[in-house]
Amino acid sequence: MELSRGTIAKALVAVFVINLIVMGVGAFYSAQQIPPIPKEVVGPDGEVVATETQVRDGKVVFQRNGLMNHGSILGNGAYFGVDYTADALDLKVEHMREYYARERHGESYADLSSPDRASVDSLVRSDLDRSFERGTETIEYSAAEVYAHRQVRDTYVRRYHDGSLDRGVPAGFVDSEREARQFADFALWTAWISHTDRPGSDHSFTNEWPYSPAAGNTPTGSTMIWSVLSMVLLVGAVGIGVWLYKAVELPEPKVSGIEIPPPDEISLTPSQRAATRFIPLAGALFALQVLLGGLLAHYYVERGAFFGVEEVFGVRIVEAFPFALAKTFHLDLGILWIAALWLGAGLFLPPLLTNHEPDRQKTFIHVLLGALVVAAVGGLAGVWLGAQGYIDGPLWWILGNEGLEYLEVGRLWQVGLLVGFGLWTVLVWRGFRPMLEREARYGLAHMIIYAGGSIGLLFVAGMLYTPRTNIVMTEFWRWWVVHMWVEGAFEFFIVAIVGLTLVSMGLLRKRSAEKAVAFQALFVMGSGVIGASHHYWWVGQPDVWIPFGSVFSTLELIPLILILFEAMGQYRALATSDETFPYTLPFMFIVASGFWNFLGAGVLGFFINLPLVNYYEHGTYLTVGHAHAAMFGAFGFLALGMATYMLRISTRPSEWTERRLRWAFWLWNLGLAVMVFVSVLPVGFLQLDAAFTGSYAAARSLAFYEGEIVQLLFWARLPGDTMIILGTLVFAYDMVVKRFTLRSVSRPSGAPTRGTIPDRVMTEDDD
């Protein structure tokens, strides 16, 4: 099948418009269907138990104290602590049972006979199984619910204000008893929407999530139906992916017959040398991130200590650096170091391909680098100051910590990052201008600009809520930023960058690369954007997202199959190349990225995104395995490959050595495999079993994590983590060493020399 680049480009535009319409209409519809926060919750005697203000204040407490990076809400967040929704529902059921047991039988629930327990259980489920009438502003609790609500408040005061070291919570984690009670009100409201039927429906706002048979929460029919349909669609998606790869002539890289200029014959411009300064910065951020990752892993086996450090130095690490704060830094540093390498690569490639050095480009790159440092330091400092209570009043979420997973830094720093993306896009446009003027709008340089612009555009969705916005809509917009980046903009960026890199290595003709990039981008954007809606199933969004999320999440496998085939083609090219091929190591990173992308995002991603599986596993260690394999394996390895490629070109040939980087490469791959397959996934499957045979709250409980087998599996993660840390430290050291062995710079002059990279790129016709 012959498809022209123009035809693919038109299809890509059509898909983009369709995505915009579907998600735009979906946003409007979702805003009309979100669960309400009642003005008041009252008891049978009319006494006010909770108010809308208290619930919204509780969400503020939740975000300001970084509780989303300790536990999770509606299944979203960290997995160290409980899921507050499931926990509040579980505690509510427990205390309601105790109330009815005392009231009806004069005994503790534990002492009742089986028939009496069944009677009490039925009363509890009857209380919880209620429908909400649209327009209702006051919710009436039963006496048992009032009692349970107050007991849950007391529990949360003891845990999150008084402190609970067995849960990794230091004293004063939440500043006051009043704020801890408000947080309980917020958690209990999310529990209320989980057991209260949506108007005109026979299931709750959260599609009966979390699984809690005691509360009457079990999977809905649509969850089962769309899981079956997804399995059927999976077979079709695999077939479509293979057929497309075979039918559409996507080029594979070839080494033989192509002149590959040695790195020392490529001019190194001032702006390229400036772009390499992003690399040691990324290395430092990366090293700090993995060290914090080791601390986080250890917290699961010693929640209130760290190898006896407290006994030696008299410093309780859980108080100085609690899990929530360490997790926040770990996530943000991961985003920052990958972004830094991608930014550097985007600025390094234009002179390589165009032989063009814009005026003052070096100065502007230094400005961007300085802005990134300011945003990183300012954002992380704001997170720490905000979490420690030093930034109070209305500025806490502007300058401090916004407190939402992946979007923790204050709004000011987020705006700064958005401006930085804008500046980067302008600088890349300046560098690619000669190519942009010659190529069609679907050319490789245009693709890079589009990808960078879409990353910034999606970031705007993170500005559409405040800490007092209903958590259901907050989560809607947060996932626009997070998952549409991962499944849309970042994947788009990956295929474009890889295409450009293969062209610059001399492995592909530009026209062939453009067709491959546009074709893969078509399916990435066609499935990934709407596919992000699988995050809306259990958070209170309307039912329509279940079929959308199921279908498009399954279709996300198609571009990943294409990427896998491409990685296999790249591996064949690598295996058949001779020793004179100078870019073997960067090529190895690109191949590894494709492999981990298929495994982490494709295989593990599809498995946990089956609605029925996701219903039980949502927010368990299976998601941790998927996230690490996809984020570090796919995006991280690509970023590291680009850093290696930049250094291969810019380092003096006499000083170039691959030994340390090869050690790092294999330490990372082996370490990631051990971490995911020996520790993380086995814990996740045990959690899935605990949720399926008991309840979701049981799978996220402290008792589960302290189980003997689970603790052994947590210790089994140590070798993998150690290898990743060692690989990163070797990489960081090598980056510093190579920064002092860079070649001299020169400004390009005149037309490109025949046979060079710019000559091949700039003289190809674009019909």
Image: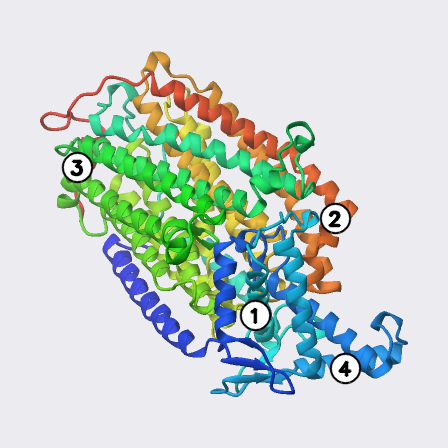
Element under label 2?
A: loop
Q: Earlier in the sequence, mark 3 or mark 1?
A: 1
Give the side of residue 218 with respect to residue 537, left or right: right
Q: Looking at this view, is 131 or 578 the one in front? A: 131
Q: Residue at x 18, y 21 (%)?
A: 746
Q: Is residue 284 above or below residue 188?
A: above
Q: CA distance from mark 2 to mark 1?
A: 27 Å
Sequence-wise first label, 4 or 1: 4
Mark positioned earlier in the residue sequence (3 or 2):
2
Return the residue at label 1.
190
Residue 339 lies, in percent from the top left, at: 37, 41
Disc 4, SS = helix
Query: In the shown orientation, is residue 719 left or right of residue 20?
Result: right
Q: Picture coordinates of residue 479 (x, y %)?
A: 44, 60
Choose the circle earlier in sequence order: 3 or 4.
4
The image's colouring method is: rainbow
In whole angstroms, how far apart are the C-alphas of marks 2 and 4? 32 Å
Give the quadrant of residue 358.
top left
* Mark 3 crowdedness (10 Å alpha carbons): few <14, some 14-19, many ≥20: some
Query: Residue under circle 4?
Result: 122
The residue sitting at 16% across, 31% down in the picture is 357
Q: Which residue is mark 3?
A: 762
Q: Residues within 10 Å of mark 4 (few under 14, many from 20)?
A: some
Circle 1 SS class: helix
